[in-house]
Amino acid sequence: MAKLGQDASGLIFDHIIAAKELKNDAALATLLGIQASTISKIRGGTLDPSSAVLVACHERGGLSFPDMRAMMPIPKA
């Protein structure tokens, strides 16, 4: 599987932080129900967001899957 990349996951996280008026990644982690270190690893590019993280972004963060997909790079064939 292709790496999502730090820019794409950062855009998704930054969008939720702005939309929900959160102060930082720790508040985002609490909202999404994941550890802050997981967000840090995803932002740093050492961990791809799992399907559970993407579902949490959808359910708790208010992002639609098409919106998240639009923020992700399109893999080249």
Image: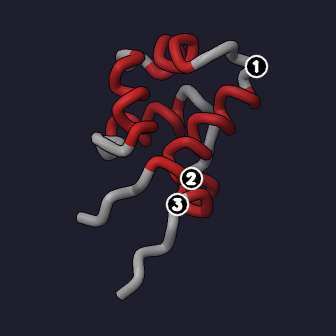
Mark toward the start of the polypeptide (2 vs 1): 1
Where residue 66 appears, as percent x and y from the top left, is 59, 59
| Disc 3 target residue | 72
* Secondary structure found at label 1: loop
Q: Nearer the viewer, residue 38 or 69?
A: 38
Residue at (55, 42) in percent of width and height: 10
| Disc 2 target residue | 68
| Disc 1 target residue | 21
For the residues bearing labels 2 and 3, Cβ distance under 8 angstroms: yes
Per the model, the C-alpha gap separating discs 2 and 1 is 18 Å
Residue at (53, 52) in percent of width and height: 8
Per the model, the C-alpha gap separating discs 3 and 1 is 22 Å
Where residue 76 appears, as percent x and y from the top left, is 41, 83
Circle nearer the viewer, 2 or 3: 3
Q: Nearer the viewer, residue 17 or 40?
A: 40
Query: What type is the residue that disc 2 sits on?
Result: Met
Categorize mark 1 by other alpha carbons within 10 Å: few (<14), some (14-19), many (20+): few
* Secondary structure found at label 2: helix
Looking at the image, residue 57 sits to the left or right of residue 64; the answer is left
